[in-house]
Amino acid sequence: MKVLLAKSAGFCYGVKRAVELAAKTGEETGGCWMLGDLIHNSHVVEDLARQGVRKTEDSAALAAGDTVVIRSHGELKSVLDDLEARGVRCVNATCPNVIRIQRLVAQAEAEGRRPVIIGEPLHPEVMGVASWCRQPLVFDGPEAVEAWLDGDEKSREIPVTVVAQTTCIRKLFETSWKIIKKQCTNVKIFDTICNATHERQSEAAEIAGKADVMVVVGDRKSANTKHLTEICLRRCPRVVQIERADELSPDFFNGCTVAGLTAGASTPAGIIKEVYATMSEEIKAAEGKEESFEELLNQSFKTLNNGDRVTGIVTAITPTEVQVDVGAKQAAYIKLSELSDDPNVKAEDIIHVGDQIETYVVRVNDVEGYAELSKKRLDAAKVWENIEQAVEEKTVLEGTVTEENKGGIVVSVKGVRVFVPASQSGQPRGADLSAMVKQKVQLRITEVNRARRRVVGSIRSVTEEARKAAQAEVWANIEVGKHYTGTVKSMTSYGVFVDIGGVDGMVHISELSWSRIKTPAEVCKVGDTMDVYVISFDPEKKKISLGVKDHSIDPWQVFMDKYQVGDVASVRIVKLMTFGAFAEVVPGVDGLIHISQIADRRIDKPEDVLSEGQIVDAKITAIDEEKQKISLSIRALLTPAADEAEEEEAPVEE
């Protein structure tokens, strides 16, 4: 009979850490407590008891000065708070992956989001995680998720953050979060299934598909062992879950040529070895050598080579390095200088114990048993790959202008220097490019030479494309009377050009104001925001005529509502003629001050007394409503009596 042993069988990192921490604490204290089963394996719990780590299910029985080891599944937050308040020393052996989930649900609630946990509601890990927030939603699978969504229509509008029990079956989790993502409007999803769990489940499924019988070793209270059994049952006709070798029956292997063996994360290597020996006394390799259980376990370790990309779990953060479990024989670590490009960043600000991290292998030292890793170099390599991909896909990237360079500017895109020639900067020829420094810009990469570390980009191609799209949008929807908020782009003596979204329209000087003006500069300047409306447009000639004056207002009616004959108005001189002066009474309505009514003496010409733009008081002496004409007099306010007498004697001019 051939036995296929799963390379990932046995203690995962979190379980191994918890057992070692408990044994060490028991030795240091001369005896301590564990609150509940440290891990779901009765044999390990019994062995720890023999080492002085006793079990209690009642946290209230612990007194000040006692030391208690918190199990790998985690504990209720209320219990931890109570123990701390009562002076009980807690040694936290909670799996770093579980701690991460606790942190995620607490953060979700702080952000006003509803935590959703996919897992077994009564499992210690799930109960512990749920205690780190006030209103968690716990579902054991897609059916429960659908029942929740169907039960209340408003549930789809709640912002939710979805996490999974570390030992959750991946298919069950994926099915659940896909339902939530499809039906809910505001969802954040975190794949918190332990990487080791996923590898163990995938490998178990693969072996089960090749085996006639499958043996799963682990405590019956272990969730991950139970899930392994469920997965194997889908691929293999005969599956048995046992805790020890003495539970095996020879009859189980009748007619079997290939048997598979896997074990849960809390199963010690000694028990796996015992089961393996019972299933097959001799397993020979192709060379005919006996292959020991230890050798098989060693095969499960990765082989590291310089330049490899590897993914691992952060196990510790020290003042000088970050320790990472990459599933290799060597102890792997990242120097803080190789963690980030930012020399001022702190490790704990960007990474935490239990986080999964992808790194680059810098150096492997098999003699001393360690491997140096670098996240910074991997990030840099990824950036270059993204830059090269951006050229092929013509992706628009964002960066910050860092300096003006000879012939152009330099833009930093994710730490890569991109040179943008002046002609591709999107600025007019001869413009001051230094004004762009520190601005965020969008650009396309046009050329990459990774060997020479040369990257060339174009801002102009992005802005031109955006402008063309905006122009098409304007011409597709333009209509007479439509209002726009535009920007004054340029000015002439006869009007101004206004950008209404990629297209320039012209506002004639007569449309800029009801008041009489000589130049557009009197009412606006380049860069001003202006509310305009379409008077007319010609799509073929690409011309648009715009207006600013509100034609719903009748200036003459405004005048008539405000003034009548005999009233005195403060008027502005707008034009001087040989026969008198025109003055603005209200915007859009002018009156005539005849030369004879400008002063209380005879004058040769109006400019002897008045100047354009001058503000004077004048009396309204006549209103012709039909012709909308107004007569004004300054003289009438100076010497009224003499003026009336002279008017009686003065001949009427034709």
Image (tube, helix red, strand yellow):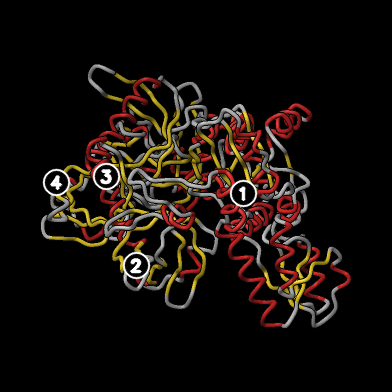
Asked which secondary structure carries label 2, the reply is strand
Q: Earlier in the sequence, mark 1 or mark 2?
A: 1
Residue closest to the eye, 28 or 589: 28
- Disc sitting over residue 372 in the figure: 2
| In this picture, residue 486 sits left or right of residue 131 | left
Q: Position of residue 149 (x, y in %)?
A: 72, 30
Task: Give the residue at mark 1.
Answer: 264
In this view, the mark in front (1 or 2): 1
Task: Give the residue at mark 4.
Answer: 423
Q: Position of residue 106 (x, y in %)?
A: 67, 56
Q: Residue at x 77, y 30 (%)?
A: 152
Give, as a three-letter code, the residue at label 4. Ser
Q: Earlier in the sequence, mark 2 or mark 3?
A: 2
In this view, the mark in front (4 or 3): 3
Give, as a three-letter code, the residue at label 2. Glu
Q: Position of residue 39 (x, y in %)?
A: 69, 58
Give the Cα distance between marks 3 and 1.
51 Å
Asked which secondary structure carries label 1, the reply is loop
Residue 27 found in image quarter: bottom right
Q: Are marks 3 and 1 in contact (CB under 8 Å)?
A: no
Give the Cα distance between marks 1 and 2.
30 Å
Give, as a three-letter code, the residue at label 1. Gly
Q: Residue at x 28, y 50 (%)?
A: 607
Task: Give the residue at mark 3.
Answer: 443
Give the Cα distance between marks 4 and 1.
64 Å
